[in-house]
Each structure stands twice: as structure tokens, then as C-alpha cells.
Image (spheres, rainbow, N blue to C red):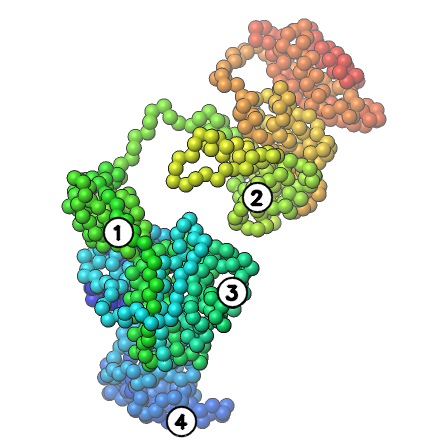
Amino acid sequence: MPRIPLTWLAEHVELPADLSAEQLAADLVRVGLEEEAIHPAAVTGPLVVGQVVALTPEPQKNGKTINWCRVDVGPDHNEPGGAPRGIVCGAHNFAVGDRVVVALPGAVLPGPFAIASRKTYGHVSDGMICSARELGLGDDHAGIIVLSTLGLDAPVGTDARELLGLGDEVLEINVTPDRGYCFSMRGVAREYGLSTGAAFTDRGLPTGDERPAGGGFAVEIDDATPIDGVPGADRFVAQIVRGVRADDPSPSWMQRRLQQAGMRPISLAVDVTNYVMLDLGQPLHAYDLAQLAEPIVVRRATPGEKIRTLDDVERALDLEDLLITDSPDGARGSRPIGLAAVMGGGDSEVSSGTTDLLIEAAHFEPITVARTARRHKLPSEAAKRFERGVDPELPPVAVARAVALLVEHGGGVAGELTDVDQRVPVPPFDLALDLPARLVGVPYTADEVRETLVSIGCDVSDAAPGTVRVQAPTWRPDLLVGVDLVEEVARLRGYDAIPSIVPPAPPGAGLTPGQRTRRSVARALAESGLVEVLSYPFVGTEQLDALRLPADDDRRRAVRLVNPLSDEQPFLRTNLLVTLLDTARRNVSRGASDVAIFELGLVTRPVADAPDAPQLPGGVRPSDDELAALDAAVPPQPRRVAGVLAGQREPAGWWGPGRRADHTDAIAAARVVAEVVGVEMRAQADADHAPWHPGRCARLTTADGRLVGHAGELHPTVVTAHGLPARAAAFELDLDVLLAAASPDPVTAAPVSTFPVAKEDIALVVDASVPAADVLDAVRVGAASSAAGDVVEEVRLFDVYTGSQVGEDRRSLAFSLRLRADDRTLTAQEAADVREAVVAEAHRRFGATLRA
């Protein structure tokens, strides 16, 4: 984001003398430029100009020679009585009489590095004579700063922070994509003027001193394959500068401003182009004229073409990339010398031997620039501006400014100018003067609307009654239709003037039955001791492999994202457990070994041979057939609920050893979900469904046989792959199936019987291969068919026994029955009838016998 030094901004707009960065931020936020950060002054405390009045070299035992100096720092800073301060300095590039920069005790230099009086080399050094690097002015640490070498002169005792620009606060702002002109001092100054009424001087307008075009370096724009019919470039300005010392350092004031703006000074040619870009908003590029061959051709890349950019990387080009090329050996446009508006090429860069330059400023189309910058991962400062829109009137002004700076500070002579201008005039559009008031809800008058449009640079003329014709300024390519101007009126007239009115809630609306049920499911699972989590829906092949899914499993058919957040996770999940198990693994790896978590979320289940999504036209409403085709191409996204339980389900303590979570906890949690939804769910053994254990997995269905999900113990290989405690369990249910099976009728409360309960315990011996759930169903059916009628209130399996007493490959299942009638007290005979009916039904189905 752009950084705004206040002293630099003051060259464009009138600023109060006491303006702080904090106040500047408050002024700019009123027009939509938000504060990102305030960077404090580089140096705090006393930093003054001093004059060396005595210098005594003193050789040391280590072979080093230090200078014991007496430095006059002015009457306000000298020692008591007016004597110069004594300072030890190890540099030798100064002499008696030189004026230097002195940091006095109490100053804090970049680092931070606090200055204090200290004893060293047998003297008390009462301050420090500073080098450029110590003040953050550059990398030079070979010697201290001598003001005369910088072309500066100031009285002894002068505040050096102000002299060198080290006391400036810098405001960093956040610029929205439609305000690209604010990536410059010119643009920010304009907005400050609109916010405060301060006088703004537009330094981006022609001054009349610009050299007329003609006789310059030959340039051609030849875009044979424009994107959406819009050429990649419509203006190219280039001027020759001969005899310039391009590799000299730039002046200190320019280096300091570049550093304040967040850029590293490099050389005069590079610094000048960067400085003008930051000042006016027009990116420029400097070429070594000796390395160029006429003509320069701006064109699209050809198949297989490559370029070596300034970062010394060879890049394969795309056919959409816009190139700046030259013509060595007469081959027109054969050599790429730059990715247009993104980065220059290495074949024509300015070097230490460069004396003749070609300074280029062009106007490039934003979409082309944005695609190239993202394709090659080159978010350059130039691309950042061009992809947001640059003023097409700026190139000749910016080139003239850059050439003048080069000539002033590097010598040389300005040469011929080329200006290839193929711009198409932007048509004006009409605006109803009452539109801002109607859309914003503030009664803006017609005069207020006109005044606002003129203030942002629009040409406004009368059209039909109540309507004006508006020609947007060239620096605002985002103003294309009337509603764009409505936003400007609201912004500049003050967002605080827009009332905050909360619309009334429509009566009768609220959560749908499905939404209420989903919330009830989440609440019930939380009350059962599980913690709700939310995981990212992106997965990779390795995660599916960790679930031991077969190669032909439908859950491996996943939607691949075109632009995934991570190349390792390019797919959308097809089940919840794949991401929920990763969440469990992360918790266990961080010490939370007892895990009970659940998630409610969508999964994506693409259908084989599904049609491709159509490419819909922009700017028009799709037809019903197109919308239907689009809907048909969207894969189903059922809503699931899943949970993972691992470690201790009940903690150990004085009350006992605790209990580890197992498959029964997962099945119980799944039954909690079904109970909340109001659906009877049946469980059957499923010996082959990953990622569950083949012997401890339940297939869960509705009464009519529709698959709801699975629950049970996870396969040991899956547990190991995820680093979970042994015997971890999980469940996953299709919540949409459960909701579809739920009755839409309201639940009717059943009368509570006031008659006493009768209890019966029955132990049935069956083959060990018979599932307990099937025996439980037989108990329920048998009890309901007894002569006493359907008097079963509850049936519960409370014991499983295997051993010699029941025989080999047999087991005893003990059930507890609670019996109660609505209209009478059950007799002992009726309880016995229920018992006999249960035994008979279990014997009929499984050959069960009553355990003795």
C-alpha cells in the first residue's frame, strides 16, 4: 500500500504547518482512504549539525587508529561553559572545519540504537558523529556524512532531522481497486483537497515546456490479438537522453523520499523513474539506448517465446502476454525487451557503462496487465498501478519530468521525443440529477450534485431537463455509468450524512424447519459431550488414501478446483470424516488425547458423466434453458453430520478406572441425531465399508431401508495413519436423508400412565454370529405380540456373556424389559405371557433358548 511522507505531499497540496500523520489519516478516511499504518520518524531526540574544531588521531594497541574530536554543536548543545563536545570517531573521511551530523545523548537512531555518553578508548565520548547507514539514509558505512559533499549547508546547532528529512512521519494508506490514481502523491493530494478544501496544484498537467514529438526512436503498436477487442496498449511515449551519468547515485533528498515510500535507492536512472512514478502515478522504464535496435514493437507473445526479465529469470510466455520488443539485425520486433507494464528485460537494462537512455512511459490495458502479472507471479509496482488504471494523459508529462531530473542531476542532453497515440475517445454519459438522492436516501440538491462532479474533475453540461451529460476525467477510468457518480456524491458529501435505518423484520419469517432441526442436532450432540468444529473442505489424494478407500469407491470421485489454495489439496471433500479426522489428529498431536468432536457441513458428490457447466455471456440475463443447464452441471452437495471419539470417554478418578471411547459411543451419538430428527434408525453389521473396522461397523438405515450412514470403530490402519489413540470411533450420517424421512406432522404428546411398572429380565442364548441388534428387534416384536398386548415401555441389552456355561460359539444376551399398561396394573400372568412371547419369537428366528 502507498506510503505518504507529509513533506512530499505538501508539494502538491497546501498542508497546515502542524499537520500530523494521525490528522492526515483522519482527513483522508472521510473520502474513503483508510489508514493502514503510521510509520514514526526514523530518528528521535537531538540530532544536530556540528563543526569539527579539533581532531587528534590516536593509534591503538589493536592496530586501529581512532580520532579524538572536539565538535562545536552550538551554544544550546555544547558542554557547560560553551566548550565543544568530545567525541570518539573511527572514520577518517573528514577534517577540521567540516560540518557533520552529530547524534547527542538521548537520541535514538534506526535499529533502535540509543545514544548515550560512554567511556571508550580512554575518553568519554559525548555523542556520535553519524554515517549514512547509521541514520538509515543508505548502505554507505565507509565514512561519516560531510554535509558539503551532499550540497548542504546549515549553521552549527541546526536540527539535522529536519535538514535530512529524518523527522518525518509517514502515513501508509489502504487503496481500494477502483481508486488506482491514489497510488501517487498527486492522487492522494487531490483527495486531501476534496476532504479539507485545501488548495491543490495538479502537477500532472502539461506545462507547455514539453518537447514536441518528432524524429524520435521509432515505435509501433501492433496488437493483432487484443483481449475482448481492446488493444493492450494505446499510447507509447519515449524520449532519448544522451550523455547522462545513469549509474551515479541519485541526490540525497530523492533517496530519502524513496526510502520513506518503501523503495530502495539503486542508481540515478532507476531512482528517477521510481520517483516520478510515486509522484505522478505513471510507471516509467529506462532502457540502455546502445542496446536497442529500431523499431520498438509492442505486440503479443508468439508460441514458445521466452524472455529473461530483470530478476534474471527466464520466463516462458503466454500468447496473451503483451511484450515490448525491438528489432536487432533488422528483424522487426524479434527480441522481447520487456513484459509490458510488469517488468523489463535483462537484455536492455541500464548498466554501469550506460550513458544514453531511452525513457519510456506508456498506457496499457488493465486486464492484460493483471493477467500477465498473476500468470508470472510478478506483482510489480508498475503492474499494481496499470491493472487499476493509469491516466492516459500522463505519459508525455511524466517523461518530461524524468528527463529534466536526469539532465539536472546526471548531466546530458534531452533528445528527440516519440509519441504514438492510438487512444479512442471515451464517450460521455448522462446522469439524472435526482439519482443520487433516490439511491442513497439523502436529499442531495441538483447544485450539490453538479458541484461534486466538477470537484472530481468531470466536465458537466446540460442534457435533457433534470439530466446532465458527464465526461469523466482521464484519471478516473472507473467512472463509466451513472451509479459510479452516485458513489462519488455519497463519498464526498460524507458517508456520515447517510442515516442508519434498520429495516423492519417481515412478520412470519424465521428459521425453516430444516434449519431448526439442524440447530437442535448440534445442540444435542454438544449436550452429549461432543465439541463442534469447522474444517476446511479442501482435500488431497493422500487424505483419501489414509481412509483406505478402494480405487473404485465413489468417494474418490471429487471436484477439482481450478485455482486451489494449495496444490496439495486441490479437491472438494466428498465426506466429512476426511477433514474431521485431520482436525482430530491436530488436537491429539497438541496434547488433547481425549477427543470428542463433531461437524455439520456440506460435501460435494459429483455424478459420473455429468454435463459440463455452460459458459454464460456477460452483461445479459441468462435464459431459462441456460440456467437449467448450469443447475444440472452443479454436483449434489448433501449436508452431513459426522463425529470422531477417541481416548477416554469417561475419565478415571476416585470413582473408578474410567472408560475408553468405543464403537458403541459412535453408534449412540448417531442415534442421538436420529432421535432429535424424529426418525427411527436401524443398525445392521457392515463388514466392508472403509474407513471402519470390518467387525465393529454398523450400517444405519431408515425404516424403509434408505442408507443414512455408518458408525463404529475405525480401522486400525486409519487410526495409525492419523496418529489417534487406539480403538478410535466415528460416525457419519446424511442429514438430508434423515430430514426427508422425518414426518412433517407435529409431535403429539402421549399420555403418561399412572399405573406401576413391571420388570422382566430375559437371557437368551444364541449363536455368536447372530447380531445383538437382530435379537433386540425380536425381543421387541415378541413382547408386542403377547397376550397382554403392547405393554413394552423400554427394552435394553444390559449383558453379553460367552463361556463354557453357554457352549462353544454361543453367547448369552441379557435384556431388561420395562412393562406398563395405560389402563391397568399388569398381573404376574401378563408379565409371564410377555416373557414367553419373547422367547418364542427369538427361538423362531434364531433358535434361541432361555439361559438356565
C-alpha separation, residue under disc 4 versus residue under disc 1: 68 Å
Q: Which element is circle 3 on? A: strand
Q: According to the image, label 4 marks what residue?
A: 57
Secondary structure type for disc 1: loop
- Give residue 560's mark: 2
* Residue under the image location 73 percent in, 13 percent down: 841
Residues under labels 4 and 3: Cα distance?
55 Å
Q: Secondary structure at mark 4?
A: strand
- Label 3 vs label 2: CA separation? 32 Å
Name the quadrant containing residue 771. top right
Residue type at mark 4: give it: Pro
User: In the rendered structure, which amino acid carries the disc numbered 1?
Assistant: Ala
Earlier in the chain: of badge 3 and badge 1, it is: 3
In percent of width and height, residue 495 lies at: 25, 46
The disc label shown at residue 32, or none: none
- The residue tagged 1 is 472
Relative image position of residue 619 (x, y in whole percent): 38, 40
